[in-house]
Structures are given as C-alpha cells and as structure tokens.
Image (spheres, grey):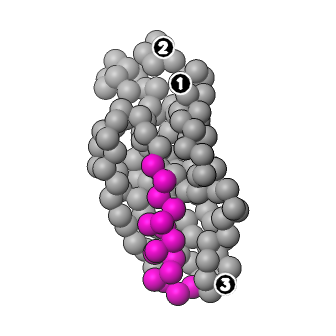
Amino acid sequence: MIQEFQISTRAEESIVNITEQVERIVAEGKVKEGICVVYVPHATAAIVINEGADSNVGNDLLTALNKMVEKHGGWLHDTIDNNAHAHIKASLLGPSETVIIKNGKLQLGTWQSIFLCDFDGPRERKVIVKVLEG
Ligand code: ZN
C-alpha cells in the first residue's frame, strides 16, 4: 500500500512533526508485522526521526545544520538557483526513514517522532508512505 499527503511549510526552514499522519496510514493498512518507509520526493527536504517531546530538539538540529553548512558559502550550485545549502542539508539527513511495524503499530521509542525537514520553504511538500507486510 502506498499513500501520500501534503505538508505546507510556512518558513524558509522548518521541521514538522508528521508522526500522526504516518500512524494513521499504518492503522488504515491493517498490517500486523512489516515495515513502513516514509519518503520525500524533494531535493531540498528530508525525513528524520528524533525526539518529539521537546520542540527545541528539532530547532537545535536546524541550528546545528546552519553552523555546519554556511548559506552562500561559495557553493557552485548557488550560481544556478541560490539554494545549495538546502541541498547539502537535505543530503546530510536523507530523504527517507524506515520504521518497523509490530502488532499493527510503528515501533517508535517513547521519545521518537517522525519529522519532515524543509530547507527551502515555504513550499508544498509531498510525503509518500509505503507500508509493506512481512
Ligand atoms: Zn537547487
């Protein structure tokens, strides 16, 4: 089963908790045991799993990436569309995460949530979720 949903981001950079949307898709799929792949088909966005209880964890991640990847730091791609930093950050985190499903539920830890990271917003972002039984 494959399902998609859209997220409208509201800032140039943002991290959005999408755990509820993914859990809903897994519940509808009625898969008892399997895996769930959460994927963004975008070159300047990423999917990451990290703590969801304190929103500062996500904000700290954005801050850390900004310290690591200088905006307009002489990147070659900036001569084309001025968003090389966004591509680099998206590459560091990657476009997908895989979560194990057991007893019909995502096996996220107590403190884990699934996030969409947008590094070149605000935009409409598509998230694709594939649920596989097995
Ligand atoms: Zn670009």
Q: Earlier in the sequence, mark 3 or mark 2?
A: 2
Which quadrant of the structure image shows residue 6?
Answer: bottom left
Residue 57 versus residue 32 in the image, above or below: above
Identify the residue position indicated by label 1 in the image: 66
The secondary element bearing badge 3 is classed as loop
> 82 left or right of 75?
left
Amino acid identity at mark 2: Gly
Q: Earlier in the sequence, mark 1 or mark 2?
A: 1
Identify the residue position indicated by label 3 in the image: 103
On residue 46, the disc is none
Q: Label 3 to label 1, Cα distance in Å?
A: 39 Å
On residue 73, the disc is 2
Q: Residue at x 60, y 23 (%)?
A: 68
The secondary element bearing badge 2 is classed as loop
Which of the pair 8/38 is nearer the observer? 8
Could you tell me how many numbered marks the image carries? 3
Q: Could you say where residue 26 lies in the image, as x and y percent from the top left? A: 51, 77
Q: Could you say where residue 30 lies in the image, as x and y percent from the top left? A: 52, 87
Question: Which region shows up in magenta?
Answer: 16-31
Q: In which quadrant is the C terminus drawn? A: bottom right
Amino acid identity at mark 1: Asn
Let me know if residue 71 appears in the view: yes
> 49 left or right of 75?
right
Contact between labelled residues 2 and 3, with CB atoms less than 8 Å apart: no
